[in-house]
Amino acid sequence: MEHIKNSTKLIGIKDLNIKISIVLKHQTHIEIRAELDYPAPACPHCQGKMIKYDFQRPATIPILDVQGMATVLKLKKRRFQCKACRRVSVAKTSLVKKNCQISQPVWAKITQLLIEKQTNTDIARRLHVSVSTVQRQLNAFTFKDNFETLPEVLSWDEFARNKGKLAFIAQDFKTKKIIALLENNRQTTIKNHFYKYSRQAREKVRVVTVDMSGAYIPIIRKLFPKAQIVLDRFHIVQHLSRAMMTTRIATMKAFDKTSLPYRAMKNHWKILQKDSRKLSDKAFYSRTFRQTLTPREIVQKTLDFSPELRYYYELYQLLLFHFQEKRVKAFFGLIHDNLGTVNASFSRVFRTFLKHETYITNALKQPYSNAKLEATNKLIKDIKRQAFGFRNFKNFRTKILITLNIQRERTKIVLSRT
Ligand SMILES: [Zn+2]
């Protein structure tokens, strides 16, 4: 707690050498006229004795709103003259930096609002400053990379920045802190970044979670020789689910568009995609079948139209079952048994799975996934949308780090106090 003794301090001006002379309330804003004055110091040029001279013409400095109104400080600064060298110098204040027209409390407020995820335009409007002033403050944030240590569990992914370009992101699985945010996802960029860490630091990484593409696997093995690679569970299931979707559509198209089989496969696609163990037991009126049915009954009736679809449906559901129950042997056994008979979509997925068998097995045995990083990527999308896309990656990166790293640390500080 701080005891505020005077009105200048109340409006955020800490410099006691600033004295308010008059306050005018205009229709659109409040104008505070003040003077900056103090006893003459020694001459900055020759250390000689100075005397008070005149006042400078008032400078207009925006300060924080008073009574919810835009407020400007019209500040007249004292000038001193040296009796020895005759040179004139101007009184100094901590309120504004040299050659700057924005007061320190406004800078501090910009910083706070940037951390609170406000958009640059909103901040500019709220504090009556230009967007480029906010941008300048954003640029003042510097993030020092720490190349000493790496987390035990890392999540890797990429995200779209602009015009289809992909940026690279790595996150600490446990703390959700962003560890790396790189302009592109080229292998050399990633390698050069992580080689800044010592081999010792890199060997401490135990697990790296990554999506299904497999593109990063060779460099992960090089960079983190002791790490287990874990493919993301969600992506594995997504691959299966897509194969099921393609198969259903192909089966459906063999029927006439007006026929019941076609309409059942089309209109009830969600029920067919869903994990059968999660189907509800509640009956509802199906307009396609013109009767009240439970989702299970709809599945059976639809599969009656096509033995082929039934085969794929059952295979898909069994794979989901083994996967969720973490039955590695059964999961891969089923894939091996059906590899020769499945259609092209399933065959492609199966071959990918077999290629990454070790990493999928890790996914089934380890509690780690990319889920938290996916959530971070959603936040990044919001930041991008707010700013209508960032032309400059450095600004984008700063904004992401302010929002996700600084904010998290602040929250932690607040939480740890209680
Ligand atoms: Zn002098």
Image (cartoon, rainbow, N blue to C red):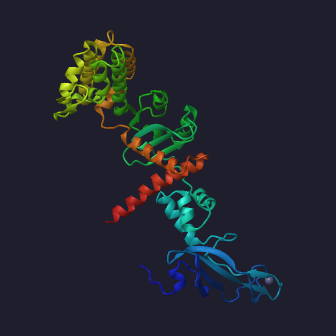
Image quadrant for the C terminus?
bottom left
Regarding residue 101, the answer to whether it shows in the image is yes
**Taking 345 as reference, is 69 above or below it?**
below
Quadrant housing residue 266: top left
Q: Is residue 87 left or right of residue 180?
A: right
Quarter placement of the N terminus: bottom left
Q: Quadrant of ligand 1?
A: bottom right
Q: Position of residue 278 (x, y in %)?
A: 21, 33
338 left or right, relative to 98: left
* Residue 329 visible, this orientation: no
Q: Nearer the viewer, residue 89 or 218?
A: 89
Q: Position of residue 245 (x, y in %)?
A: 35, 24
Q: Position of residue 21 (x, y in %)?
A: 62, 89
Quadrant of residue 72 within the rendered picture:
bottom right
Residue at figure coordinates x 74%, y 82% from the top left:
56
Provide residue 4's location: percent of width, then percent of height.
47, 84
142 or 127, nearer to the observer = 127
The residue located at (33%, 31%) in the rendering is: 363
Single out the residue that lies furthest toward the right. Answer: 85
